[in-house]
Amino acid sequence: MIWNSLVALAFVAPSHALIRFGCSQLVVNRIDPLVNPGEAPSPHMHQIIGGNSLNVSMFPENHDLAKLSTCTTCQPADDFSNYWTATLYFRARNGTYKRVPQKGNVGFEGQKGGMTVYYMQNQLADYQQKAQVKAFQPGFRMLVGDASATTKAQADKYPQLTYTCLQDMNTRFPETKDFPKKPCPAGIMVNVRFPTCWDGVNLDSPDHMAHMAYPVSGTFESQGPCPTTHPVRMPQVLYEVIFETKAFNAAADWPEDSSQPFRWSFGDEKGFGNHGDYVFGWKDDALQKIMDEACYVNCKTMRTQTIDQMNSCSVDSFVNEDVGDNNWLASIPGQPM
Ligand SMILES: *[C@@H]1O[C@H](CO)[C@@H](O)[C@H](O)[C@H]1NC(C)=O
Ligand SMILES: *[C@@H]1O[C@H](CO)[C@@H](O)[C@H](O)[C@H]1NC(C)=O
């Protein structure tokens, strides 16, 4: 579905909110406060957006993101959550690596790296958003995907983690479970969609996934009911991360054996290990208030800040190492040669 036609068709009055916003980069760093708290460096590199209370450890009992943050890289001024994914690297023919930068989506061209975040109650193309969801609670966090997945069957356990090979910035299909096999003129968009049914009790779980589930009918897109074990319908959180591949699209730089040259920061060359992390940090009940408004993208209850304000928020690096933005690296940080 093409974004412009979505907006053009949005004449049916919505019942509840769907929001879509840009967030600039907070930091690119080898930390993972959800999976590897206290470890700096963590096993692999991440690109992280959101509130500047980000730290190597952020346990919910003593880390209130909304209270500790003084700025956020996200457009909604009340969103101090942290959102992250792995970073992407390009492997040159001589075996050295450079990090592939991200760019803002349509409408957020001025943002510095980062990604686009959505909160929806029904699927993206549904302008009515009739379902009603409960917003996440303070202390809530979750993960989706499996960094160790190496086969399509393993990746298919997570039905909505995909790639879109952007012919232009409005390309939205097809979506694939593995990396595009050919150069993508406008970049590679990584789509990370989280499960939407909560057990109603646990803000987290040992694998950071068991407290959440998919609807019984399969995917969120089917708009089916939640299972009895996870009865509470939550917003669907979607990340669109657009990796700007234009410096790496020349056929002469691609491998001679016609394989594709991109690697996730955890070494994955197929792309089946796509995953994303979420640590909730909206101020008070700001997210619930927005979700309850009848609006599609342009929601009055969502206080916003300018792209300059988003871009001016950042944190110092927790790990002092070259992430490969300017120099060709002998190996991806933390990975074997
Ligand atoms: C991160 O945590 C450390 C250890 O608790 C603390 O000393 C430091 O001030 C924190 N940094 C930020 C930016 O909150
Ligand atoms: C490796 O390849 C890159 C990209 O073509 C090039 O810029 C770099 O100089 C090469 N490094 C070495 C050591 O040859």
Image (cartoon, rainbow, N blue to C red):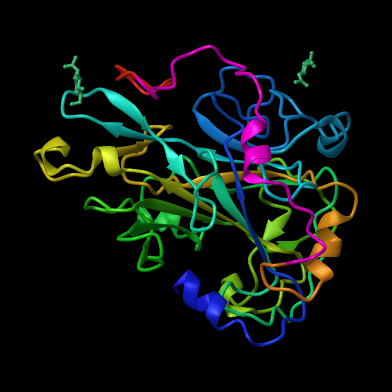
Does 60 lie within the magenta span? no
109 shown above or below 159: above
Q: Residue at x 70, y 57 (%)?
A: 212
Q: Is residue 320 magenta?
A: yes
Relative to 253, say whether 155 is above or below: below
Q: Residue at x 34, y 60 (%)?
A: 168
Q: Position of residue 286 (x, y in %)?
A: 85, 55
Residue 294 percent location from the top left of the image:
78, 76
Region of the chain picked out in magenta, as a range: 299-326
Residue 186 on image: x %, y %: 33, 53
In the displayed orientation, state which residue is furthest to the top.
320
Which residue occupies the foreground of this view, 99 or 297?
297
Which quadrant of the figure has residue 319?
top right
Q: Which residue is at the far bottom?
A: 12
- What residue is drawn where x is 68% and y is 49%? 75
Is the N terminus in the top left, top right, bottom left or bottom right quadrant? bottom left
- The image quadrant where one finds the C terminus is top left
**Rendered view: 331 above or below 284:** above
- The answer to whether residue 286 is left or right of residue 210 is right
Which residue is drawn at the image coordinates 9% and 38% (left, top)? 256
| 233 to the left or right of 265 | right
* Secondary structure, magenta segment, majority class: loop
